[in-house]
Amino acid sequence: MSHRVLLVEDDRVLRSALREALTIEGYALQTAASLTDARAQLQHAPHGETIDLVLLDLGLPDGEGQALLAELRRSSNMPVIVISARESEGQKIRLLDEGADDYLVKPFGIGELLARMRVALRRRGRTSEPALLHYRHGPLAVDLKARRVRLADADVRLTPTEYALLARLVRQAGQVVTHRHLLADVWGGEHTEQTHYLRLYMGQLRAKLEADSADPQHLLTEPGVGYRLAEPDPTD
């Protein structure tokens, strides 16, 4: 099962970049642009879902991320990684002493962030499975590392949103991904009720990837629940 990460960050560009990168790596990402939004998501998680790790910016529109760290440490052992442009050694030491698992200064590389996330999760006895980067089902092949989609050995050009949706399904190939999870992970938590986005982009994907979009063989519908990418072909 994917680890669920809450990203608390008010920079829309960075949120978008991290959503794409973490989704490809197999994480289920929720985002919050303020302390108020983050608190609401932490307090009212859907039944059966928990946040496994928090990525926390410091300078937020309605306060300091440090306040949320203090709240979390009073009630939880959840891993928290601070991501901030502030480079003060004193601030780093203070936040680490107050319970942050790590402190990463912006700008940072995605590879370094992912490594630090794996370490933080391991310290809590949780391991991250290696990312599924390649998918093949009949004539459809997806290479997430190279950002390449091929159908019958011909490259298929997808829009960024089409690609993000396909990548999210690849990460759980063979399993149903609910409408709400797809909307949250691809478009953001504020769009979880806007299922027309899914219908529109799924229609576009099927037009590009299915021989007959009315009888899909790769992108399958689970009525009233969500969508499922067909099981990958067995590896040799």
Image (cartoon, helix red, strand yellow):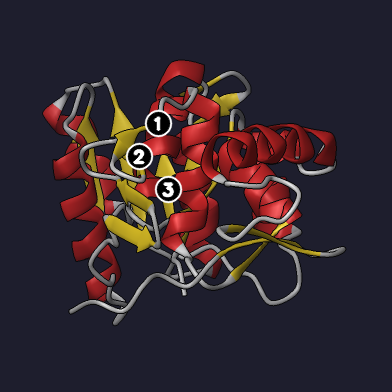
Tell me if 160 is positioned left or right of 31 in this view: left
Checking the image for residue 220, the label placed there is none
Q: Mark 2 or mark 1, which has the lower sequence index?
A: 2
Tell me if 222 is positioned left or right of 98 in this view: right
Q: Which residue is mark 2?
A: 149
Disc 2 to disc 1: CB gap under 8 Å = yes
- Tell me how far mark 3 sits from mark 2, CA to CA: 17 Å
Q: Label 1 is placed on what type of residue?
A: Val
Q: Secondary structure at mark 1?
A: loop
Q: Which residue is mark 3?
A: 23
Nearest-to-viewer mark from 1 and 3: 1
- Residue 82 on image: x %, y %: 32, 41
Q: Mark 3 or mark 2, which has the lower sequence index?
A: 3
Quarter that holds the C terminus = bottom left
Identify the residue shown where x is 59% and y is 61%.
Answer: 217
- Tell me how far mark 2 sits from mark 1, CA to CA: 5 Å
Q: Secondary structure at mark 3?
A: helix
Q: Secondary structure at mark 2?
A: strand
- Residue 139 on image: x %, y %: 38, 54
Query: How busy is the neighbourhood of tag 2: few (under 14 within 10 Å), some, or many (20 plus)?
Result: many
Q: Quadrant of residue 201?
A: top right
Residue 67 can be seen in this image: no
Nearest-to-viewer mark from 3 and 2: 2
- Tell me how far mark 1 sits from mark 3, CA to CA: 21 Å
Tell me if 121 is positioned left or right of 62 in this view: left
Checking the image for residue 156, the label placed there is 1
Disc 3 to disc 2: CB gap under 8 Å = no
Identify the residue shown where x is 76% and y is 49%.
Answer: 214
Q: Label 2 is placed on what type of residue?
A: Val
Tell me if 28 is positioned left or right of 199 in this view: left
Identify the residue shown where x is 47% and y is 73%.
Answer: 231
Q: Label 3 is placed on what type of residue?
A: Thr
